Amino acid sequence: MSLKACIYDLDGVITDTAKYHYHSWKWVGSQLDYTLTEKQNMKLKGVGRKESLDKILKWSGARISEAEKQNLLVQKNHMYLEFIDKMTPEEAFPGFREFNKLAKAQGIKVAIGSSSRNAIRIIDKLDLVLAFHAIVDGGMTENSKPEPDIFLLAAEKLQCEPSECLVIEDSQAGLTAAKKAGMKSVLYGDDKGIKGAHMQMNSWADADLEKFKSLFS
Ligand code: B16
Ligand code: MG
């Protein structure tokens, strides 16, 4: 078995959108008379939009109608997109472009597997639309992370077996999804609370394609 494909998470792996989500979810919290902490925001990493609101409602104990929920989701996304639309290509993490080019030059297929329904808009702002063989976002599958659907669809689009794919993720939801998909994984970042990755790297400066390949031998 050899490494045939890298499936990258987007938010937190290729760029830092968590700060924009935090600002927007904090506003949602304020509408519920609740103060969302940064630690709680970390728990929303990789979790779909609707599921994130459900968690905030649980933490706050607030009870609202389905129509109010929909309204908050629309407003949260509106606020978030105001930040996204100001993003520039410089917001891609340093070293990502170089790693991705190296992987492709070695015949490795590359895809995005993101829970975000805004993934294509973000990738466009980073000027990376043509950098991948496939893009799978949260709007393309029935279930979001931690279910494996997003990564399995990415493997299918790349025409690779799950056992030939390496997922690079920054969230527990994403690593659980990779495991359920039967894929190897690398944790991006140094969050000690996140479990289940086969390897860890702090940044793209640490990314070592040969080490990644060795996970498959
Ligand atoms: P949206 P990823 C995830 O993206 C984010 O980590 C998570 O914080 C967010 O709630 C989710 O996308 C949905 O995002 O509201 O844009 O649809 O990390 O899977 O790339
Ligand atoms: Mg992420």
Image (tube, rainbow, N blue to C red):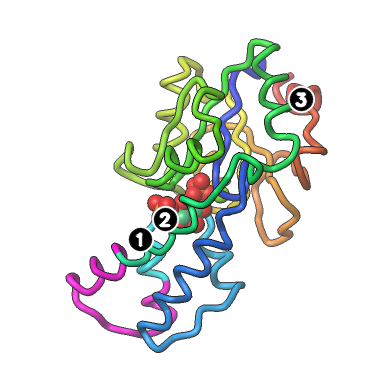
Residue type indicated by callout 2 = Leu
Q: Where is residue 127? Give x, y as percent.
A: 55, 33
Q: Where is residue 119? Give x, y as percent.
A: 44, 42
Who comes first in sequence, dot 3 or dot 1? 1
The residue drawn where x is 32% and y is 37% is: 140
Residue type indicated by callout 3 = Leu
Is residue 86 on the magenta stretch?
no
Q: In the shown orientation, is residue 113 left or right of residue 210? A: left
Q: In this view, does 8 lie above or below 28?
A: above
Q: What stretch is highlighted in magenta?
A: 56-74
Q: In the shown orientation, is residue 163 left or right of residue 74? A: right
Residue type indicated by callout 1 = His
* Mark 2 vs 1: CB contact within 8 A: yes
Q: Name the residue under label 3.
A: 209
Q: Mark 1 points at which residue?
A: 78
Give the spatial CA distance, label 3 vs label 1.
38 Å
Report the front residue among 134 and 168: 134
Q: In the shown orientation, is residue 83 left or right of residue 28? A: right
Q: Mark 2 points at which residue?
A: 81
Q: Is residue 163 visible?
A: no
Report the front residue among 17 and 141: 17
Q: In this view, does 51 lie above or below 110?
A: below
Disc 2 element: helix
Q: Where is residue 183? Give x, y as percent.
A: 57, 32
Disc 1 element: helix
The residue drawn where x is 51% and y is 23% is: 130
Q: Where is residue 50? Give x, y as percent.
A: 33, 60
Q: In this view, does 89 lie above or below 160?
A: below
Quadrant showing the N terminus: top right
Is residue 61 on the magenta stretch?
yes
Packing grade of label 2 (10 A; few <14, some 14-19, many >=20) is some
